[in-house]
Image (spheres, rainbow, N blue to C red):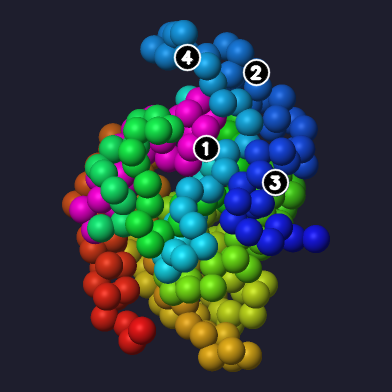
Amino acid sequence: MRPATIGAVRRAIVACERCPELREYCADIARRGKPEFAGQTYWGKPVPPLGDSGARVMLVGLAPAAHGGNRTGRMFTGDGSAAWLARSLYRAGFATQDRSERRGDGFAMIDAYLTAAIRCAPPKNKPTTRQLERCAGHMRAELALLPRLEIVVGLGKIGFDVGLARLAETGFALPKPRPRFGHGVEFRLFRERDNRAVTVFGTYHPSRQNTNTGKLTQAMLDDVFVRVRTLLDTQTP
């Protein structure tokens, strides 16, 4: 049986043991820590989503960072990627503040729901196909509990592809040829049975690999969420 509320989804994710190798890896990272976080107690468990069932926008990332979400216990919190994403979300009106550093710091989503393709930090940020498949049930449950969803944003290729796959499973027809990931890509999906539409966006992930090399700039990330905001505000209620 699928969870009946977002709260139940969160609890199911935190208690998940579908990938024992990832549970062991995250716990090991939590035991060893990192010098710059000396004295801090790591979360070291699957990381639950952030947001509520009234959200019209869903963001799909890759996974919690070993010393970010795996440390803080909150999606996109406490690392470089979180800093970039929080600024863009706040500027577009999707977050309460422009920083996401730790649980209880006041950061919260506004009309948006933040989740990931996999809920445990994987070694080298590279989840296996089997691990992604094991985690898929959590997103299926989330989509069933977001009745107002209008926009899905894939943060990076894996988040984009996984979000697309889960939407297709719920009956949204994929255009042909199948949409390919790219920064700023935007397209509409339709579901005939209830005449619903969802717009899907892609953006480069705000990882250090992308931000330190200039592949992704803050302005580029801002532009995506400004476009999301514009579309959301102009669509017919």
x, y percent for residue 228:
31, 67
Q: Position of residue 195 (x, y in %)?
A: 54, 91
Gap in Å between the C-alphas at discs 2 and 3?
A: 21 Å
In this picture, is 163 found above or below 107? below
- 102 or 161, nearer to the observer: 102
| Residue at numbered disc 2 | 28
Query: Mark 1 highlights which residue?
Result: 64
Circle 2: residue type: Asp
Image coordinates of residue 10 in percent, x first then y, are 61, 47
Residue 190 image point, x, y percent: 52, 85
Q: Which residue is mark 3?
A: 12
Q: Nearer the viewer, mark 2 or mark 4?
A: 4
Residue 153 position (above or below residue 42): below
Q: Amino acid at mark 1?
A: Pro
Q: Earlier in the sequence, mark 2 or mark 3?
A: 3
Give the distance between the C-alpha atoms of the residues marked 1 and 3, in whole angstroms. Answer: 16 Å
Q: Amino acid at mark 4?
A: Gln
Q: CA distance from mark 2 to mark 4?
A: 14 Å
Front of the two marks 1 and 3: 3
Residue sticking out furthest to the right:
1
* N-terminal-most mark, 4 or 3: 3
Which residue corresponds to the image point at 74% horizontal and 30% vertical from the top-left? 21
Residue 83, magenta (yes or no): yes
Callout 1 crowding tier (Cα within 10 Å): few <14, some 14–19, many ≥20: many
Closest to the observer: 83 or 7? 7
Name the residue that disc number 4 marks: 40
What is the magenta range? 68-92
